[in-house]
Image (spheres, rainbow, N blue to C red):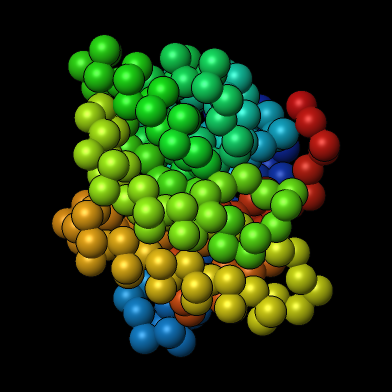
C-alpha cells in the first residue's frame, strides 16, 4: 500500500503516515549500515517496532509500510492491538518485550511469536506448565541483567549458567536465546561492554545445554543504542521512538 492508501485504511492523516514512513526507512537504513559495518548481513537482523502507548492505527500503518514484527510492553495492550489488526487482516509477528506477571501468562498462550522477557525460573515454569497443558510449545528468551542494575529485571549471568541444563529441559517451552537492556548512557558507546558480555554469555550457553540449533536469538538494543548492539551480535533490535516518534506516557 502507498501512503495515501494506508491513511485511508487506518484513518491517520497523510502527513503522519508520510512521517512514519520516513522514520521507518531511516531506521532500516541505519540497521543495514550498522550490520555491514560489523561485517554482518543486514538480513540477520530482525527489526521489532515497539508501538507501546500508541493507537492501533499507528501499528497498523507500520505493518502497511512493511514492518513485519511488532513489540509491546503490556499484555492487555498487545492483545487489544492484535485483535484490532487481525480484524483489518494484518498479522504481524507479535513480541512481548515488557515485564510479564505469572497471572497474565494464561492470556498469552498461542498469541505470541516470541516472549522476550522471561526473567525468572518461576515464570519459565509457569509458561512451560500452561503451554504443556494446552498442547503448545511457546518460544521464549531469557532476560539477563548483565549490567547488574537493581532497577532491572532478569537473571544474573551466573544464575543462567548454573540453571541452563534445567531450563533447556523444560517441556512446553523452547528457549531461543537471551534478551538484555543496557543502562541509558548519555554516550551510547558506553553500552558496548554490557552487550559484549551478553554476547559472550550467549555463546557459552549455545555451546552448552541449549545447543546452537534453536538457541540463536540475541535481543539487544533500542532506539539509542541499536548500532552498538548490532556490533556486539544482536539478532533482534527493539525500536520504538526512532520509528514511531515520541509517544504519550500511556494510552
Q: In this view, does 89 lie to the left or right of 54?
A: left
Which part of the image, by quadrant, shows the C terminus?
A: top right
Q: Give the camera-side residue of 246 and 217.
A: 217
Q: Give the camera-side residue of 135 and 81.
A: 135
Q: Note whether 131 is above or below 155 in the view shown.
A: above
The residue at 76%/79% (across/down) is: 187
Q: Note whether 248 is above or below 159 in the view shown.
A: above
Give the mark count. 0
Give the x, y percent position of residue 17: 65, 45
Give the x, y percent position of residue 153: 62, 45
Residue placed furthest toward the front: 162
The residue at 66%/81% (across/down) is: 189
Give the x, y percent position of residue 160: 42, 53
Q: Note whether 120 is above or below 82 in the view shown.
A: below
Picture quarter containing residue 217? bottom left
Q: Give the camera-side residue of 29 and 216.
A: 216
| Residue 23 visible in the shown view | no
Q: Give the camera-side residue of 121 and 103.
A: 121
Q: Is residue 25 left or right of residue 67?
A: right
Q: Note whether 189 is above or below 51 in the view shown.
A: below
Give the x, y percent position of residue 15: 73, 47
Q: Is residue 157 left or right of residue 170?
A: right
Picture quarter containing residue 206? bottom left
Picture quarter containing residue 174? top left
| Residue 113 visible in the shown view | yes
The residue at 47%/30% (across/down) is: 123
The residue at 37%/64% (across/down) is: 202
Which part of the image, by quadrant, shows the N terminus?
A: top left
Amino acid at each position: 500500500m502507498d501512503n495515501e492508501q494506508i491513511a485511508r485504511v487506518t484513518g491517520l492523516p497523510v502527513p503522519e503516515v508520510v512521517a512514519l514512513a520516513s522514520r521507518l526507512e531511516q531506521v532500516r537504513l541505519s540497521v543495514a549500515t550498522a550490520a555491514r559495518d560489523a561485517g554482518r548481513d543486514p538480513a540477520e537482523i530482525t527489526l521489532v517496532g515497539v508501538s507501546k502507548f500508541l493507537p492501533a492505527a499507528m501499528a497498523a500503518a507500520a505493518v502497511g509500510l512493511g514492518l513485519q514484527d511488532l513489540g509491546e510492553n503490556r499484555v492487555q495492550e498487545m492483545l487489544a492491538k492484535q485483535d484490532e489488526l487481525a480484524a483489518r487482516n494484518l498479522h504481524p509477528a507479535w513480541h512481548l518485550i515488557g515485564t510479564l506477571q505469572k497471572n497474565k501468562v494464561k492470556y498469552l498462550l498461542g498469541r505470541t511469536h516470541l516472549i522476550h522477557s522471561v526473567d525468572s525460573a518461576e515464570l519459565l515454569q509457569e509458561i512451560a506448565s500452561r503451554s504443556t497443558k494446552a498442547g503448545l510449545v511457546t518460544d521464549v528468551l531469557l532476560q539477563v541483567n548483565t549490567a547488574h542494575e537493581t532497577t532491572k529485571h532478569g537473571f544474573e549471568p551466573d544464575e543462567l549458567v548454573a540453571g541452563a541444563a534445567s531450563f533447556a529441559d523444560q517441556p512446553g517451552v523452547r528457549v531461543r536465546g537471551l534478551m538484555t537492556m543496557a543502562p541509558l548512557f548519555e554516550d551510547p558507546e558506553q553500552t558496548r561492554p554490557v552487550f559484549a558480555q551478553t554476547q559472550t554469555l550467549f555463546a557459552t550457553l549455545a555451546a552448552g545445554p541449549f545447543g546452537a540449533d534453536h538457541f540463536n536469538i540475541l535481543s539487544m538494543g533500542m532506539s539509542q543504542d541499536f548500532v552498538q548492539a548490532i556490533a556486539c551480535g544482536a539478532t533482534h533490535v527493539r525500536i520504538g521512538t526512532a520509528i514511531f516518534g515520541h509517544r504519550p506516557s500511556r494510552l
